[in-house]
Image: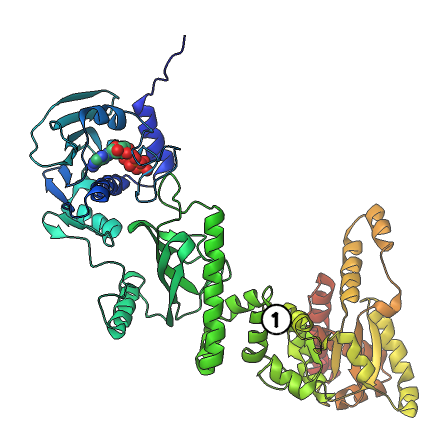
Amino acid sequence: MNQKFQVDLRGVVDLLSHHLYSSPRVYLRELLQNAVDAVTARRVGNPDAPAAIGIELTDRALTISDTGVGLTESQVHELLATIGRSSKRDELGFARHEFLGQFGIGLLSAFLVADEVRVVTRSVSGGPAVEWLGRSDGTYAIGPAERDEPGTTVSLRARRGAEQWFEPETVRDLCRLYGSLLPFRVTVAGEAVSGDGPPWRSHDRTPGERDADLLGYAQDTFGFTPFDVIDLAVPEAGLTGVAYVLPFPANPAERAGHRVYLKRMLLTESGDGLLPDWAFFARCVVDAEGLRPTASREALYDDGLLEATREALGARLRGWMTGLARTQPARLARFLEIHHLGVKALALHDDEMLRLVERWMPMETNVGRMTLADFRARHGTVRYTTTAEDFRQLAAVAAAQGLAVVNGGYTYDSEIIDRLPVVDGDAVVVRLDPTDLVTRFEPVDPAEELAARPFVTAAQGVLDGLGCELVLRSFDPVNLPVLYLVDRSAAFQSELRSTRQQVDELWAGVLSAFEKPREDRPRLVLNHRNDLVRRVCASRDPEAVRLAVESLYGQALLLGYHPIRPADAALLNRSFLGLLERAIPSEDQQ
Ligand SMILES: Nc1ncnc2c1ncn2[C@@H]1O[C@H](COP(=O)(O)OP(=O)(O)OP(=O)(O)O)[C@@H](O)[C@H]1O
């Protein structure tokens, strides 16, 4: 024999309150939504039918009345007392587009704040008025009622502990929050909470008034005066609205929440997934007819239509940027200054944005800040460092060798430069490897090199212990005595060596298999043009040479922002104290 499911209403309400809805406050939204749907349903047949929704509050009790379709007695049995049953689906069970509700569970949210829900209703299709009294223990009673006009009144009394959700001010603020854009007049204690419609509507104001209203809306709701306002429209999702461009840099990791209305009812103030990730510089207010809510009605359901909408809105924002480039380049430059991260992230995937960045976004170079387009026009090849440390270490040295270099160390910059040839086949981009610089330095005069040989041998002896190769060259700038140059493989090798010193024999053996020959070791390049270096080269005092080489090595590590290993730290300390000793001899040496 077939049996029917039994439902324990308390379990369902508990599920709703703890796992579906984020706050009991949603009971107001659900009641408001039912009233709006009932009025909408009545107006489908009779567009001139009255459309009024009123909320009244007395001590700890709330009633909401609408002039909607109302329900007959059999509909009350079928719709109010059956969880999951809704009049807002079509024959195939799909949500009907004109209604806000669809799931058939919204009314249950009243039990989040009350133990009893009383509904008095009279249907437009005739028949007497009916009263339905539903209780949170899952029982209900139906009886006759008095009501002159078609429509419905729902009454609740606050459960102990839920009184705060019936405070007149709270109710008014929540109704204004959810319902300020609703197309019907909504009042709370006689005061209208619905307004004139979305702030981006254009039929009833001059363009100037509309602009002012839109700015005022951003100031009131978001607390900023936007850099710009972009109109949005995605007809397939029935979406209209605006994107406000933030006037301050946004943190890409912190998603700016969008204010999303579905069919004029607020869905969320912190909507996610409406714009592509890169568009973190914009904050939207939109109303959509076609997008779907999740069952909690607190977020957008991520389906194919939302994805298509996201793409369309992304294209709109991109179009706005390229439009600015054409018509107001100075404004675009200002925008890029504020939102460079978002735009650069976009340029990694989007050719048009990459061109825009190349033309308009200034980058740091060792010959001044300039756009990549200007850099290419002046220097041809785009030579760049991948880290800011490399740039800081090498900018002046490279400039002295006549090499223009871009600092690719800022977020996305080197990836952007790497992508340049994709949009422009003529672009030549070369990554500057620090050790390439050595090939540009002049060798030391043979006679002087010969004279410095004893020093070089002694110095190399000191550096062998540090896994480093000594090179003597002449280069500019003269005031720079020393450079520690390490290419990527050398950096890896030096890490390998320091790890090997710390692990046991077995692992040391395994790791040694990866070690490379001497020529790949980092280089300490001494500048023979520098006066101090020349004096050190001439020294024949082994102790002075050791101290000088260790100090120069330590200095070069610090100047180049290289990692300092424990052995390096000890050496820095030792050489510093050694130098002090020499500078201030003890009394018996004096
Ligand atoms: N004010 C009202 N006037 C007329 N009918 C109503 C009213 N409130 C509720 N109903 C009827 O009760 C049904 C169930 O309402 P409920 O709020 O539980 O679900 P829903 O609005 O259909 O969907 P959702 O769960 O998405 O809100 C509705 O489909 C509607 O037919």
Q: Foreground: 582 or 119?
A: 119
Look at the image and tell me whether residue 377 can be seen.
yes
Is disc 1 surrounded by few (<14), some (14 to 19) or many (20+) residues within 10 Å?
many
Q: Nearer the viewer, residue 52 or 189?
A: 52
- Which quarter holds ligand 1? top left
Residue 140, compared with residue 45, is above or below; it is above
**Quadrant including the N terminus:** top left
Task: Specify whether 573 is left or right of 215.
Answer: right
Which residue is rendered at x = 19% and y = 53% of the image?
Answer: 194
Which residue is the extreme one toward the top?
1
Residue 479 position within the rendered picture, expressed as x and y whole percent measured from the top left: 70, 89
Q: Position of residue 566 (x, y in %)?
A: 71, 61
Viewer-proximal residue, 415 or 541? 415
Side (left or right) of 28 relative to 516: left
Left or right of 44? Residue 478 is right
Residue type at mark 1: give it: Asp
Read off the residue under disc 1.
413
